[in-house]
Amino acid sequence: MSGIFKAYDIRGIYGKGLDESLATAIGRAFVTFLKCKKVVIGYDMRPHSRPLFDALCKGITMQGADVVSIGLCSTPMSYYANGSLGADGSIMITASHNPGEWNGFKLCREQGIPISGATGIKDIEQIVMAKTFAAPAAKAGSVTTHDIVPAYVAHVRKVAHLKRPVRIAVDFANSMGILEAKCLEGLIEMTRLYDTLDGTFPNHEANPLNTETLEALEKTVREGTFDFGVAFDGDADRAGFVDEKGRIVPMDIITALIATSILEKEKGVIFYDLRSSWAVREVIEANGGTPMMSRVGHAFIKQQMRDNKALFAGELSGHYYFRDNYTTESSAMAVLYIANVITKTGKTLSELIKPIQRYFASGEINSEVRSSQVVLDAIRAQYKGGAMTELDGITVEYADWWFNVRCSNTEPLVRLNLEAKTRACMEEKRDELLTLIRKAR
């Protein structure tokens, strides 16, 4: 069981610590912690998701809370159900992009507010480990079912403003994007790859951050006539894009494009994660928005969005967060906003992103360290002449380049992201930082 309760969710290998007995205990602890009365539960297509659902319901109802089962669904659908059905909390049973032997639980309070390690997961773990559950209720709660798909589809489709027919290729990776994409049916023509639900992932892992998983999508787009391609992750709360030439579009550039479409209707705050290109901030400003930098991690970003009444946020990992979906992800909304921009401007996706990709980025580079604190102290001393912030790790900006170094939550690693106005500057400063990091470690 050790290590299953993580910073943002509960996740582990099914049958090795994560099983039905633990699911029942988590259900009891969830109600004990939240004192909730109505809990929405959905699950993905993994073969053990349904047995875990049954066990989780047992624990929740034992404590007197009622369960609203929304059955097979994407994670964005579970967030929407939480808010729209007036639940006190929700649990999505999924291990996202992890391989088929994994499973887990994404926990929320009311209105889709995430429960993270710092805001409840550790408390729930302590209740489970110590078995300090509240006493079982005199009357057990009930389990009812609700089909959330039609309402979610209607909700998402409100953002579509397509000026011409759109054709895309979609890699579902045998996962919950198959349901998420119901929002697109009848609006966008789709060529579908791996569109049979199969939680063993027979074709490739459902992780668009792993660029190897995009090879089939890239090939399909190159060989056809498409406006773009999209790949969903396992629970469809992330999406990766390729342009009409089958080339991968960086996820921060997608954030900038979505921002232009949203800001056309309404001005306000847009968040971008601190690893994003300078160009993202510049595009938001140029379109009348107020750019704000967020730290990495969905629980932090969603809270910053709520605190600042933000319209939208994008994360470099392919999470796209919308105020209009209870300040949570909606990959289908992201697809529709990209389609909106293409059809309104009359430009291809490659033409739209070319002027935004005006700087040179290192990509994320991981270095194993014995002491991240020693590394961060060395960076503070070496780069004290720059504009330094410590929202998440250390970010330092200069006139021609910037970098961020942050620590992994789960591994002895520091992660470097760096960008410059010229490739030569990027390479020089990248190597300089890596030398410092690897000496200090």
Image (cartoon, rainbow, N blue to C red):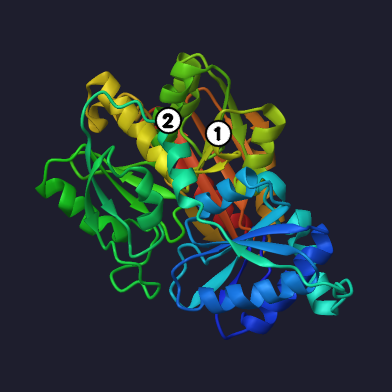
Looking at the image, residue 84 lies above or below residue 15: above
For image coordinates 64% across by 78% down, the residue present is 55
Q: What residue type is labelled 2?
A: Val
Residue 271 x, y percent position in the rendering: 57, 31
For image coordinates 44% across by 21% down, the residue present is 283
Q: What residue type is labelled 1?
A: Asp
Q: Are marks 1 and 2 in contact (CB under 8 Å)?
A: yes
Q: Quadrant of the N terminus?
A: bottom right
- The answer to whether residue 393 shows anywhere in this view is no
Q: Residue 74 carries which label?
A: none
Residue 273 x, y percent position in the rendering: 55, 38
Q: Name the residue under label 2.
A: 159
Q: In which quarter of the image is residue 104?
A: bottom right
Q: In which quarter of the image is residue 205?
A: bottom left
Residue toward you, 342 or 66: 66
Left or right: where 370 falls relative to 234: right
Q: Residue 324 carries which label?
A: 1
Instruction: Tell me the element at label 2.
Output: loop
Left or right: where 97 falls relative to 210: right
- The answer to whether residue 26 shows anywhere in this view is yes
Residue 43 x, y percent position in the rendering: 52, 65
Q: Count residues near mark 1 (Cα–Cα under 10 Å), then give few for <14, some for 14-19, many for 20+.
A: some
Left or right: where 216 falls relative to 299: left
Looking at the image, residue 271 lies above or below residue 38: above
Residue toward you, 80 or 144: 144
Residue toward you, 382 or 66: 66
Left or right: where 86 falls relative to 351: right
Residue 184 x, y percent position in the rendering: 33, 43
Looking at the image, residue 170 lies above or below residue 370: above
Instruction: Tell me the element at label 1.
Output: helix
For image coordinates 27% across by 51% down, the residue present is 170
For image coordinates 26% across by 63% down, the residue present is 194
